[in-house]
Image (tube, rainbow, N blue to C red):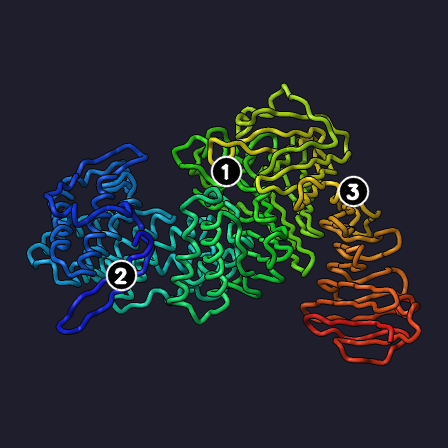
Amino acid sequence: MERMIRAALCSLFLCVILVACRAPRACAALPADFDLDAFISEPFAIPMERVVKWSREGRSHDDNQALAFDLAVEFARSRDARYAQAALKIFSAYAEHYNALEAKFHNDRNGGSLHAQLLDEAKWLVLMAEAYELLLAGGAVPEDAHRAIVQGLFEPAVAVEMGGSMPNNHQWWFNAAIGVCGFVLDRPEWVDAAVNGERGFRAHLASHINDDGYIFELAMTYQHFAFVAYAHLANAAARHGADLWNMEADDATAHDGLNGKKSLKLMMDAAAHFAFADSTMAAIKDSGPQGRSFVQPFYADFADFYREHYAHDARHLEALESLARAHAERAARGAPSHAAAPPEGPFALNGLTRNGSSLFPSSGYAVLRQDAHSLDAPAATFVFGPYGGGHGHPDKLSITLYAFGEHMLPETGRYEYGDPLQQSWAKQTLAHNTVAVDRASHKPMHVPGMSMWAEAPAGDTGTLKEFIAEKNFQLTRATCDTAVDGVILDRTVALFGGALIDIFDVSSSRARTFDYALHVNAAYAGGNIGLSEYAKSLGRDFGYQHLENVRAAEREAGAAWSSTWRTPGGHGMLIAAFGDGRLAAVADAPGNPPDTHLPLLLLRDRGERARFVTVVLPYENPDTPESVATAPGPPATYFEPSEAPAPVSLLLRNRDREYALALAPGGVLYEWNGWMRTDARTAAADMSGQEHLFLKVSRINHGGPGLAVNPPLDSLTLSHRPGEFTKLDMVSDSGADLRIGDEMIFSITADCARPGLRVNGEPRPLPKALDMRLGPGQTTVEFFCE
């Protein structure tokens, strides 16, 4: 009963009508062991005092609401008039006193008569109206009492809500309160204002929900919180013959294209694509720290509503039910439990999940999953979108990392809004896994003392450059020139070989100080650079003032800094830093909950530009760090454009497998590994498995009769087993013309006595040179030994 309003029974002549009020509870609830029978057996008072302290404002009114609600539910279940009479006593008291309490707590239009925030009063009013509906349905309200309650409580309370105006989730609750009261009391003018008004339900569908299903505040906690408001409204509408669950509105978010119709369904679809394999989510922006109690109901609520209203979409229903089960099992066992992979293909209006990785292009999120079917495989979130309004954070191009059921590079999330750390730490750039410039935060928190409710200017967003989701390789690249005036942030993040590879380029027209930060949910176990106490201050504001126990060392340019870490769950992590960062430091930073600390790894450099190159390699057994390693990889040079930064080439060893990788953000490779010439943007190889992957490629062995394709392929995977086969899996969205020259065919078939050819599994004569047209999608060409 604490989470869902259960069935209420009412009689009409000889019929029993089931009223399904299924919606999560919006306000206070009585303790589970509260004895209603004992309570109503004695006379009871109804306190009306106004408590103004922020942390407990209006508490007596919330207690009254919880009591009225539970009394009404017990009446509907038992038909015992004692419960109805006790509930009516509460409603009558408010009818008598509400107008006397109407002086606002705040001198603005968003303070309530009973609560410091009109938002809290809206939540209160929703549950009061739903409780009253149960009394009306059971014929328990005399006509004169009904008239007094409507005139003394509901009409003035709705008038107060009508005066509210907030361009965020608050307005969703104002509308819910107005609309639920309208349906319960048969006031069509209230319903029309809540549903069709300028700031009403229909307008919010069109303009507050991004095309990828996230609401514009971009925090999953507030996604759920706002959704609950309209779940109450839609359920009230359903009980009175209207369908808001399937109401659609024309897309009005022009910044991401006008892409079709929007409904509440999009918000739940998005939630099915954002979680990690254990059903947890990165606590991005004001989403709250991982594991907080208010995070737990997300998927149970979403799955319940989806099952009732959108069961025709079996893919997303299955995903939400799986996430709900995994969350419940995690809570019961105290250990991670695996959830199903997100549904493949498009979601909402422009979201996409491909090979287990998900892109939210309007909201600016990418969730990279190396293997969405594995509880242990690494997964990362990448934030490149808008600030997110008052619940946003200055976190441009920030990342998180999950592996082995743990958040290894976590987000700070949020604190209680009355906690000073919310403004001085959580809302500062240093609290996120990104780059801060000149010891300050990104906009709009770049001014000392800026309010935590500050909002960023229009157009404050990054730009997605690449999203690649292959079976064994995932990559996202984005840039941003709006976070810091005169500075360009350019970050490429990839998952490959069990590791996260991070290339962060920062450039400016003048010398600046660049701080690359990673928050590590692990204990520092040592590294190849000796750190000692750092007596200087790293910074005096913007979160730097919270750093303690700073240990640092000067580092030669380009010298590798390898450090090992031990996680709370008993796993290991190698962090290897290669690029810039003359100062290497580890410090204790605020954790969440606020009485904890979390290590911060920081690399600092100064100049007009810097490149931070980092590999994070999680591993299962912290006592065997020798089983993982990173090092500079095969030489790689640029073909074009000449002004682009040099490519990054790395070698990884993860247990018994070796990998090689070359990334060229903003350019294309020319030569890699000393012998292979290619114009691919990215080249990756599983050296143990003899498999090469090329992305955005039109030539291999460039300059000779190798492989050429026009237009470039999205990806080409080349697998080779000497004496057995050489297979080329090619993916092109639009189709392409392919030529494989005679020298390349000769070289890959030279060790076969009787070579053969198959195209998409069909045998073909082996030509001297192969010319063919590739259709859209995947084409497989295999040279094999008979």
Earlier residue among tags 1 and 3: 1
Q: Quadrant of residue 209?
A: bottom left
Percent position of residue 303, x then y: 42, 61
Instruction: Look at mark 1 in the image and give the residue it sits on.
Output: 444
Q: Please report whichever mark, 2 or 3, sits nearer to the chain's N-terminal start.
A: 2
Q: Which residue position holds label 2?
A: 192
Indicate which disc, 2 or 1, sits on the residue closer to the N terminus: 2
Residue that lies at the very extreme toward the left in this rendered image = 144
How many angstroms separate mark 1 from mark 3 (CA)? Answer: 38 Å
CA distance for labels 2 and 3: 65 Å
Q: Is residue 93 left or right of residue 348?
A: left
Instruction: Give the percent coordinates (x, y) of residue 428.
Output: 52, 35
Q: Amino acid at mark 1?
A: Pro
Structural distance between the alpha carbons of marks 2 and 1: 37 Å
Q: Which residue sits at x=15%, y=42%?
A: 46
Instruction: Name the element at disc 1.
Output: loop
Q: Is 561 in front, or is 15?
A: 15
Which residue in the protein does label 3 denote?
631
Which element type, helix, strand or loop, lies under badge 3? strand
Amino acid residing under circle 2: Asp
Residue at 20% over, 59% down: 133
On the question of residue 115 being in view, the answer is yes
